[in-house]
Image (tube, grey):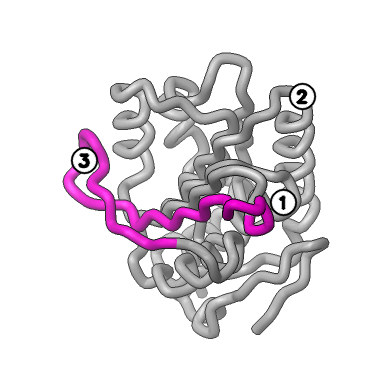
Amino acid sequence: MGLLRGAASVLADPHARLAGSCFYRCESVQARDLAVLAAAAYKRKTGQLRVLDIMAGSGVRGVRYMKQAGADEVWSNDMDTRNRGAMLRNAHTALGACCSTEDVPVAGLRGVATTLTQAPQADGVTAPALRIARVSHFEAKRLLCAAMLEEDYYDVIDCDMFGSDTLCIGPALDAVRFGGLLYLTGTDGFSSGGAWPRCGVHVHTRSTVC
């Protein structure tokens, strides 16, 4: 289905509502809006914007970083390979039809990132500058550590840990550029924090709680 969010026309995977697959939570729209607004303000201030969305789900927010915040590069990563189809379609949506695609090895990790590149045409019509979108399926902490070891720092790191609390905060702080932004959200923080223990058991173990 098509979801319209501001200037970004994005795709949600038709299997997004199935358990274990990517999903779209409408109630979190304010958090997504603030993330894009903060990134846009950073780009306006610094003139550059490299974004790493470490647990990207379907990659919807990456489209918004490109189209609404003017990102030069967005890396959408999610360990669940079942999200790959939606992530690639959304990456193509972010860059448009005129882009090249290549699987590129990631330094320090065993695996590749599918890299989509949109270069400016001679008349400057396609894009004002080189723009890059990446899609990968690495464990979040390993990708953050690899970025730090390679000194490949990002202006914005977006990390929604889905109830895992402080899982990636340390590695993310090491991988964000000095003066950059670390945007942390917790979709299921109430359950992991013990506020709704019965709900937490159900969500995280797929068990029926009587």
Residue 12 among those drawn in magenta = no
Discs 3, 2 touching: Cβ within 8 Å: no
Dot 3 or dot 2: first in sequence order is 2
Q: Position of residue 169 (x, y in %)?
A: 48, 29
Q: Residues within 10 Å of mark 2 (few under 14, many from 20)?
A: few
Bounds of the magenta span?
100-126
Discs 2, 1 touching: Cβ within 8 Å: no
Q: Secondary structure at mark 1?
A: helix
Give how far apart the Cα atoms at labels 1 and 3 are.
Answer: 29 Å
For the residue pair 34 and 26, the one nearer the viewer reads as: 34
Kindly identify which residue carries mark 1. Answer: 32
Q: Residue at x 51, y 25 (%)?
A: 176
Q: Residues within 10 Å of mark 1 (few under 14, many from 20)?
A: some
Residue 24, quarter of picture: bottom right
Amino acid beneath label 3: Leu
Q: Position of residue 7 (x, y in %)?
A: 79, 62
Q: Residues within 10 Å of mark 3 (few under 14, many from 20)?
A: few
Q: Residue at x 72, y 51 (%)?
A: 32
For the residue pair 69 and 191, the one nearer the viewer reads as: 69
Kindly identify which residue carries mark 3. Answer: 109
Kindly identify which residue carries mark 2. Answer: 45
Relative side of 104 to 160, left or right:
left
Circle nearer the viewer, 1 or 3: 3
78 in relation to 5, above or below: above
Amino acid beneath label 1: Arg
Q: Position of residue 9 (x, y in %)?
A: 71, 70
39 in relation to 17, above or below: above
Residue 104 among those drawn in magenta = yes
